[in-house]
Image (spheres, grey):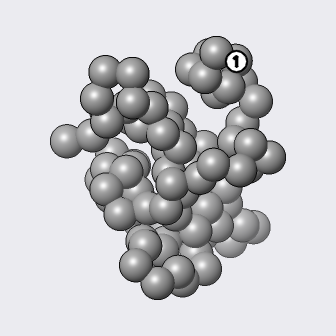
Amino acid sequence: MYNILESNIKFNKNGQILSVLALVEYSQGDIRVIEATNQPRNGYMNVTQRTDYVLFDLLQEVAGYGCEIRDKNKIPSEWFKKYFK
């Protein structure tokens, strides 16, 4: 089980998930931002058109199979202030 510190989920007007960002601590001090979107990427998780996801399960799946994000423009600024000093 992954240690999810925070998350950010974006929805469209129909309630379907567009993207999920998860701030994950894999081990002490090893904190990464992981993303899954509704756009398929080879080798990484993509969010399907379902609207019945269980939040805990979704975040665990993103942490395990999503794509690590390093682009500072995609990461919420409050996460930088709090976790990446």
Question: Mark 1 highlights which residue?
Answer: 81
Vertically, is 69 above or below 4? below
Question: Which residue lies at the image location 31% right of the left edge and 21% below the top edge?
Answer: 28
Vertically, is 30 above or below 1? above
Residue 77 locus on image (x, y percent): 76, 30
Q: Give the quarter of the image for residue 16.
A: bottom right
77 vs 49, nearest the viewer: 77
Residue 73 locus on image (x, y percent): 80, 46
Q: Residue furthest right?
A: 73
Residue 34 locus on image (x, y percent): 50, 51
Residue 13 locus on image (x, y percent): 75, 67
Quarter of the image containing the N terminus? top left
The answer to whether any part of residue 29 appears in the image is yes
Vertically, is 54 above or below 75? below
- Tell me the element at label 1: helix
Vertically, is 83 above or below 10? above
Q: Give the quarter of the image for residue 66.
A: bottom left
Quarter of the image containing the C terminus? top right
Question: Which residue lies at the image location 58% right of the left edge and 75% below the top edge?
Answer: 38
44 vs 4, nearest the viewer: 44
4 vs 17, nearest the viewer: 4
**In the rendered view, does 23 fall on the left or right side of 3?**
right
Label 1 crowd bin: few (<14), some (14–19), many (20+), radius 10 Å: few
Question: Which residue lies at the image location 72% right of the left edge and 67% below the top edge?
Answer: 12
The answer to whether any part of residue 9 appears in the image is no
| Residue type indicated by callout 1 | Lys
